[in-house]
Image: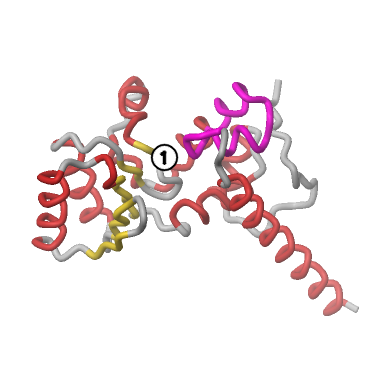
Amino acid sequence: MKRVFWLLLLVSVSVHAVTNIWIRTGEAYGIEPRLLYAISKVESDVRPFIVSVNYQKLTKPQEQKLYSMLKSRNISYKIYSKVVEIDSKNSVEAKGVVDFLDQNNYPSFDIGLMQINNMHKDMLATMKIPLSALLNENINLSVAAGILWECYKKHRSNDKAINAYNGAVIGNTYYTKVAAELRKLLLAHENSSKRLFYRII
């Protein structure tokens, strides 16, 4: 039986606003493709090689070793209130970052398009997926859709499931951010459809 992921803003119009990767994965998991895109927009701004490290969980030596590695490899990064966002130029550079973090037992870091946390390493290992494989857009999106679907099965609520994907159900504004991005996509689709209609007339 086909699974259906009911959304606050679920619509039955076509999904021309998203590319095949989103449609294919959405159909496979019964999740609105634009929801997946909205999450990736919030998580990584749709950048597949982003790796974010939670520096609040780092020891001082780990923090120093991380910055030293990034500077030695000339990899750009930004420091935010809770994370260091590492913006690799390509997949080879990003793989080096992921391997460094994994081999040195960094406690919490998020990988790729949908920012999948390394806490899922054991689960991924059962599927023979190494952490660095999450830098592949298709693998990352498929894994993320599976995690999101499990969140929905557990919580049976859109806002709770989407917040759970981000790691905390209560006291989390993540759902609001994702919903805002989803509204932008739906509005953009609506406006482009109107423009096409007017051109035809």
Relative to 29, is 47 above or below? below
Which secondary structure dominates the residues rendered in magenta?
A: helix
Residue 144 position, x and y percent, is: 48, 37
Q: Secondary structure at mark 1?
A: helix
Which image quarter: residue 54? Answer: top left
In front: 103, or 142? 103
Compared across the picture, whether 73 is left or right of 189 comes to left
Query: What's the coloring here?
Result: secondary structure
Which image quarter: residue 32? Answer: top right
Residue at coordinates 32% horizontally, 56% vertically from top-left? 85
Residue at coordinates 70% horizontally, 25% vertically from top-left? 2
Residue at coordinates 31% horizontally, 23% vertically from top-left? 122
Q: Does 78 appear in magenta?
A: no
Relative to 84, is 23 above or below? above
Relative to 3, is 85 above or below? below
Farthest residue to the right: give it. 201
- Over which residues does the magenta segment extend? 148-169
Q: Amino acid at mark 1?
A: Ile
Compared across the picture, whether 157 is left or right of 63 comes to right
Compared across the picture, whether 201 is left or right of 138 comes to right
Residue located beneath label 1 in the image: 139
Q: Does 162 appear in magenta?
A: yes
